[in-house]
């Protein structure tokens, strides 16, 4: 049995057919990365929706000799709670794997994942971000990579434009010691996508500062159409995070937390510990 679980949450939005095509293509590319087989990883696709999407099911069925499992967390609307899907996977779906890779369906893992896994196994660190920078590819760049099956480790970075790196430590891809992560309380859940990684950053910085490592490396985000966020809902979360965790949002900062003044755990630990996480019926109730 594999000792590594690779958890990938996904939502196929019936109202956004164009974006679905790109997300499915990106997912297909990521699931076929040879590194997954090399590390003997079991991949868990955690889908949010009323029923399993037949396109995801067909995609998985067409991939030969891969350890891929597909689970559904029911939700009646087209929103996605990324933190909730990760928590459900850890609490209900993955088996005895001791290391978890929690990743987005648009960010492929690169070769330095091998070093990250080694560091977790040797208990040098319990939480690892495999990169300190993510380049967002445009449509043509992504299509070229997927179509030619290029090795992302060999891409010439001179072809890309660098912008401010506002990625969080926990965002995109996070690798963790499963037991330690479960013991501290998993992801803090919101009702929709976004900000869960910002909050987890604060939690890890305050509870596990000496157990985290960020690799100096560059990763890639495959292109998909931009999702239209509900700005009112997003700003409510921004205000909540600042009030409870002392984490402010500054789009002009060089890094995500450059201007933050995070509160100590006494301010938020009870809320974090008592929140009910990974409830399979959370979004499927009348």
Image (cartoon, helix red, strand yellow):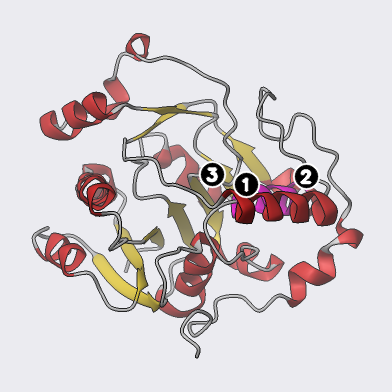
The overriding secondary structure of the stretch rendered in magenta is helix
Q: Quadrant of residue 151?
A: top left
Q: Which residue is labeled 1 in the image?
A: 125
Q: Nearer the viewer, residue 4 or 45?
A: 45
Disc 3 secondary structure class: helix
Q: Nearer the viewer, residue 159 or 38?
A: 159
Determine if the magenta segment contains residue 108.
no
Residue depicted at x 86% and y 57%? 265
Sequence-wise first label, 3 or 1: 3
The answer to whether one can see residue 150 in this image is no
Question: Hey, which residue is sitting farthest bottom in the picture?
Answer: 286
Q: Which residue is labeled 3 in the image?
A: 119
Determine if the magenta segment contains residue 198.
yes
Sequence-wise first label, 2 or 3: 3
Q: Which residues are magenta?
A: 195-205
Q: Which residue is labeled 2 in the image?
A: 247
């Amino acid at each position: 049995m594999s000792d590594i679980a690779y958890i990938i949450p996904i939502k196929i939005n019936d109202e956004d057919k164009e974006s679905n095509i790109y997300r499915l293509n990106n997912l297909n590319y990521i699931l076929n990365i040879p590194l997954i087989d090399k590390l003997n990883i079991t991949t868990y696709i955690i889908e949010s929706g009323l029923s399993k999407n037949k396109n995801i099911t067909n995609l998985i069925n067409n991939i030969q000799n891969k350890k891929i499992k597909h689970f559904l967390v029911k939700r009646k609307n087209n929103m996605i709670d990324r933190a909730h899907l990760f928590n459900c996977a850890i609490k209900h779906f993955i088996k005895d794997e001791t290391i978890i890779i929690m990743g987005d369906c648009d960010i492929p893992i690169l070769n330095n994942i091998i070093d990250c896994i080694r560091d977790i196994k040797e208990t040098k660190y319990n939480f690892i971000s495999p990169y300190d920078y993510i380049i967002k590819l445009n449509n043509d760049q992504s299509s070229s990579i997927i179509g030619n099956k290029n090795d992302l480790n060999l891409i010439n970075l001179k072809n890309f434009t660098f912008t401010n790196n506002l990625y969080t430590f926990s965002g995109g891809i996070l690798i963790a010691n499963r037991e330690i992560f479960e013991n501290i309380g998993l992801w803090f859940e919101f009702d929709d996508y976004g900000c869960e990684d910002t909050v987890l950053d604060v939690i890890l910085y305050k509870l596990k500062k000496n157990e985290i490592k960020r690799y100096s490396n560059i990763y890639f985000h495959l292109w998909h159409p931009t999702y239209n966020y509900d700005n009112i809902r997003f700003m409510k979360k921004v205000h909540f995070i600042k009030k409870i965790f002392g984490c402010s949002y500054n789009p002009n900062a060089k890094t995500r937390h450059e201007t933050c003044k995070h509160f100590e755990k006494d301010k938020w630990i009870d809320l974090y510990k008592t929140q009910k996480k990974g409830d399979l019926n959370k979004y499927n109730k009348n």
